[in-house]
Amino acid sequence: MNPSPLVKRALFIIALSISVNSAIAQSRDTTVYFFRNLRYTSQLVSSLDSADFIRVIPPFRLTDERVDVKEFYKNGKLKLAGVAIPSTINLGRGTLSLEGQCISFFDNGKRKAITTYKENQKQGTEYYYYPDGSQYQIVNYKNVSGSVYTTALLESFFDKTGKEICAKGEGAAYDYDNDFNIIRSGTIRHGLMNGEWRGYITGKDSAKYSIIYQDDKYISGIGYDTLGKAYPFKNITEDAKPKEGRFVFIEKFRKLVNKIYNTPHSRKLLDSAMISFTIQEDGSLVNLEPLSTISPDLVEAMKAALSQCPKWIPATIYGIPLKATFGVSLLISEQTSGQFRYKQNEGAQVKYYNGSPLNVEGGSAIIL
C-alpha cells in the first residue's frame, strides 16, 4: 500500500531534520525547528534526538496575509495544523502567533482539540477530545472587561465513559496528567473551580492534598504525607531557604570557609566558585559538590563549613517537606537601578519527591 501524501510529507520532513545538527535547518522550501514539550509550553532544542515534535514554517513574505504552519510528531504524524501572521514569526527562535482556527492531534492521529485564536489568544469555543476520539471538554473564552486578556469558562466536561459530569458550567471535572490519569478532581460552579479540589502528588502512594477554590482563585489548602500527617499551606510550593536569608547565609558561609582554609587568595577563589548541596526534609545541609573548578583542599574546607551551618527551612509541596538540591554562586554582586542599589546572586533549586524531581505548574505537581 502506498503511503498517503501527508505521510510522505512528514517522512520527508523527518529525513530533512536528521540531516542537520543545529536547532534550525534551512532549505529552499521550508524552515524546520525541533521542540521539546513542557507542561504548558514548549522549548526549542538543538537536535531531533532531544525533540518531541518538529515545527515547519514554509517560505513567506511579510506582505502575505497568512502562513500555514504545521507541526509533526517524530513518528511522522501530524501534530498541529494552524495559521500564523507573518509579522509575528521569529525565524531565529521558531516562535509565532497563531490566528484563526487551529486543529491539534494526538500521536495516534486522532484529533486532540479545535481552537480559535486571535492575536495568539484563545477566543470563542474550544473543543477537546480524548485519545480515542470521544468528547472530553468544551471551554468558552470570554474577554475580560477593560483588559486585553480572556478568561476560560468550562462549559461541559465528559468522563471517559462519555457521561457529561459538568453541563452549562455546573458540576464536576478532573485534571489529567499526560497519560490521562486523574491527578485531581473537584467541583465546578459558573464555569470555574469552586469549593474543594482533591488530588494526589503521584499515583504511586497515598500522599495527597485538598485545596479550596473560589472562582478559580486559591483560598487555602492542606497536604497529607504518606503517614497521613496534615500540613496546612499557603503556597502550593515553597523553595528551601535559610532562616537568616540567602545573602546572609552566603556571607556567613564564606567567613566559615575563610576561617578553615585561611589563604591570601581565598576571597578571589570564592568569588569564582559555584557549588551545589542538598537540603534534607528536616532542613539539614549535606552532599556539597563543586560546580566549577575548585581545588580539593578548598572543597574539603567548604564541606567542613557546611557541616557547621544551621538547618534551613525545607522545601515543600502542598505543605509536605521535600528534599531539594541547591546550586549557587558564592559571589554576591551589587547592582544599581536608578537611585536604588540591590544585591544579586545566581542560583537555582530542584525539588525531589521520593527521589524524583518535581515540576510544579498551576495547581498540580508533576513527576518528571
Image (cartoon, rainbow, N blue to C red):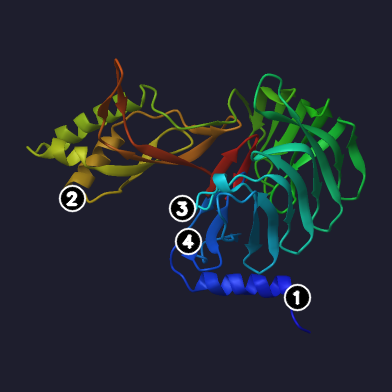
Q: Is residue 187 left or right of residue 122?
A: right
Mark 3 or mark 4: which comes first in sequence?
4
- The one nearer the camera, 120 or 17, is 120
- The one nearer the camera, 367 or 285, is 367
- Position in image of residue 101 (x %, y %): 75, 47
Q: CA distance from mark 4 to mark 1?
A: 27 Å
Report which quarter residue 252 is drawn in: top left
The residue that label 3 is drawn on is 92
The residue that label 1 is drawn on is 4
Mark 3 or mark 2: which comes first in sequence?
3
Q: What number is the disc on residue 24?
A: 4
- Position in image of residue 269 (x %, y %): 16, 41
Amino acid carrying label 2: it is: Ser
Report which quarter residue 242 is drawn in: top left
SS at mark 3? loop
Pick out the residue farthest to the bottom. 1
The residue that label 2 is drawn on is 295
SS at mark 2? loop
Label tally? 4
In the image, what residue occupies the spot 29% across and 15% down?
339
SS at mark 1? loop
